[in-house]
């Protein structure tokens, strides 16, 4: 089923809440809700730790909040992991690793235009998790192919479960590490990353896409075989607008763009209003339409969201919750403006 557009609202999953009920209530306040990830609640809820569940070779230290990898442990556990990957429950997120995910699945979500899940992507996981020699897994030619297969299986089982709650469910692959691919110092450039991501996406059911808050090569991302791309346009709007030709091609083949426009950090949030955010976003869209992007297609294939996640604000969760309220207000304003209500 297609992902809806028409300037409906969603958000990234990482939230600063320690109150599970409040976090879920906040996520459900958006048009397209999701299950929150709550790393301040406990270390199991960290997005890398959630993705690492059952991955062979993982060494998880809850007391010191560290996640690492042992090649010897991988060799011992690999055969069992490959056998158990045929069991959907083995690949799903366990209740220990998320106090919200299973409650989200128990919620009646059938009347929503869509719902969304997420999992940390293999590129970011491969950069972040390191072995005994402090070497990222992304450089391990033995582990990396299994990493792609394992994470694809985890994405698919989550999407299958979400689709039972709503046929328009889709998945975000969280890939903050993609911005490092284009650094000359990364040692893992866009060519191998492109091949690995295409192989990864080929194993994942649709709809699927990428979310990141950084500033990678947008042309590279917009050229991938995916259905949705979530971007921080509050910070990176000028750069993104320069990729008008890539955006046009992405939209023309049916892609959906998520415009992360409302800041969640307290300082920039307090400088903005619905009027200023509307002006900023419409100005960006005007630049794109001036360069040949069809306005009606753009609006019909766009969602709105906060710009980034934010775990630390002096007011705790208040600004993040205000940002969720603000993105809903901005959505109503723009839908009225462009006749989408």
Image (tube, helix red, strand yellow):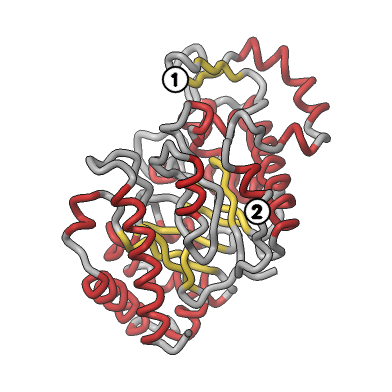
Tag 2 residue: 107
| Residue position for label 1 | 65
Q: Earlier in the sequence, mark 2 or mark 1?
A: 1
Crowd class of label 1 (few under 14; some 14 to 19; many from 20; radius 10 Å): few
Percent across and percent down for residue 153 are 71, 41
**Is 117 in front, or is 324?**
324
Which disc, if any, is residue 263?
A: none
* Nearest to the observer: residue 307 or residue 25: 25
Q: Secondary structure at mark 2?
A: loop
**Which residue lies at the image location 45% right of the left edge and 52% below the top edge?**
12
Q: Residue at x 35, y 81 (%)?
A: 291
Question: Which of 245/24 is in front?
Answer: 24
Q: Is residue 259 above or below residue 92?
A: below
Question: Distance from label 2 to label 1 (Cα)?
Answer: 31 Å
Q: Residue at x 61, y 65 (%)?
A: 114
Q: Give the quadrant of residue 51.
A: top right
Q: Nearer the viewer, mark 2 or mark 1?
A: 2
**Observer able to see residue 190:** no
State if disc 1 and disc 2 touch (CB < 8 Å).
Answer: no
């Amino acid at each position: 089923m297609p992902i809806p557009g028409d300037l409906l609202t969603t958000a990234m999953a990482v939230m600063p809440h320690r109150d599970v009920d409040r976090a879920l209530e906040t996520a459900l306040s958006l048009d397209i809700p999701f299950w929150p990830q709550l790393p301040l609640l406990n270390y199991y809820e960290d997005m890398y730790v959630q993705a690492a569940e059952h991955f062979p070779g993982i060494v998880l230290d809850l007391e010191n909040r560290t996640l690492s990898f042992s090649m010897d442990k991988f060799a011992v556990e690999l055969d069992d992991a490959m056998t158990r990957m045929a069991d959907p429950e083995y690949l799903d997120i366990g209740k220990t690793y998320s106090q919200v995910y299973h409650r989200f699945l128990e919620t009646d979500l059938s009347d929503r235009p869509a719902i969304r899940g997420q999992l940390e992507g293999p590129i970011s996981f491969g950069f972040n998790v390191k072995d005994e020699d402090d070497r990222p897994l992304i450089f391990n030619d033995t582990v990396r192919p299994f990493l792609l297969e394992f994470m694809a299986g985890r994405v698919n089982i989550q999407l299958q479960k979400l689709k039972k709650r709503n046929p328009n469910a889709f998945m975000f692959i969280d890939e903050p590490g993609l911005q490092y691919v284009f650094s000359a110092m990364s040692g893992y450039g866009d060519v191998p990353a492109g091949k690995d991501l295409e192989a990864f996406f080929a194993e994942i059911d649709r709809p699927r896409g990428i979310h990141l808050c950084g500033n990678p090569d947008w042309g590279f991302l917009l050229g991938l075989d995916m259905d949705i791309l979530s971007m921080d346009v509050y910070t990176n709007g000028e750069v993104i607008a320069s990729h008008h030709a890539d955006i046009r091609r992405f939209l023309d083949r049916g892609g959906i763009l998520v415009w992360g426009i409302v800041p969640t950090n307290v300082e920039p949030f307090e400088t903005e209003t619905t009027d200023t955010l509307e002006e900023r976003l419409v100005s960006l869209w005007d630049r794109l339409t001036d360069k040949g992007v069809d306005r009606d297609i753009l609006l019909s294939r766009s969602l709105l969201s906060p710009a980034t996640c934010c775990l630390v604000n002096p007011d705790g969760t208040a600004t993040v919750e205000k940002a969720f309220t603000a993105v809903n207000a901005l959505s109503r304003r723009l839908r009225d403006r462009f006749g989408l209500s």
